[in-house]
Amino acid sequence: MIQKILSISGRPGLFKLVNQGRNMLIVESLADGKRTPAYSHDKVVAIADISIYTNDDEERPLVKVLETIRDKNDSKPVDVKGLGSDADLRKYFETILPEFDKERVYTNDIRKVFNWYNCLVAAGITDFSLPEPEGASEEDSDKEA
C-alpha cells in the first residue's frame, strides 16, 4: 500500500494513486478524498522512494523512519505544534534518527516528515513496510524444497 502513496511538488499533503491515464495519473488526496489529475509535468514522487541523509554517507529510507516514529508513538499522531521551536523539533527527530545529517536535513524537511506521518495515520495507514520483490519469494521457496 505504501508504494502507492505519492507526494506531488507544489501541492500540500499526500495522495494515493488511483489510476493511470494516458498523460496523467489520477490521484486521491488522503486528507479529503478528492480526486485530481497529476500531469506529466508535475513532479510526483512515491513515498517509498524518498530517503533521509545520514552521517554515515548512506541514506535511510523514509519508510524505515516512519516505522520508527510509529513504534515510538504507538501509532498515534505526533503533536508538531506542541514540540514548539525548531530546536525542539530537531531534538525530537534526533531521538528517532540519531544519525541524521544535521547540515543537509533542514527543519522544514523534519516538519514535513512529521506532517506526512500524521496524514498517513489519519488516513488509517500504519503499515509502512514494503512488500518483498516477487523474485525474492520464489528464491526462498526454491531453497526450502
Image (spheres, rainbow, N blue to C red):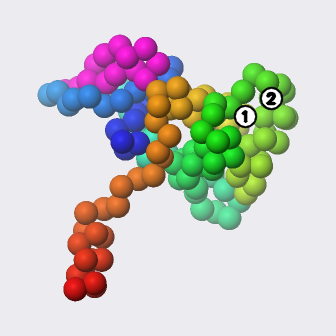
Q: Is residue 115 left or right of residue 35?
A: right
Q: Residues within 10 Å of mark 2 (few under 14, many from 20)?
A: some
| Quarter of the figure with the C terminus | bottom left
| Quarter of the figure with the N terminus | top left
- Observer able to see residue 8: no
User: x, y percentage for residue 118?
Assistant: 58, 29
User: x, y percentage for residue 89?
Assistant: 78, 34
Residue that carries the numbered disc 1 in the rendered image = 107
Q: Earlier in the sequence, mark 2 or mark 1?
A: 2
Q: Is 17 contained in the magenta span? A: no
Image height check: is 31 above or below 132?
Answer: above
Q: Is residue 115 left or right of residue 97?
A: left
User: x, y percentage for residue 46?
Assistant: 40, 40
**Quadrant assignment, res 40:** top left
The label on residue 72 is: none
Q: Residues within 10 Å of mark 1 (few under 14, many from 20)?
A: some
Under mark 2, the amino acid is: Leu
Q: CA distance from mark 2 to mark 1?
A: 12 Å
Image height check: is 22 above or below 104?
Answer: above
Q: Which residues are magenta?
A: 23-38
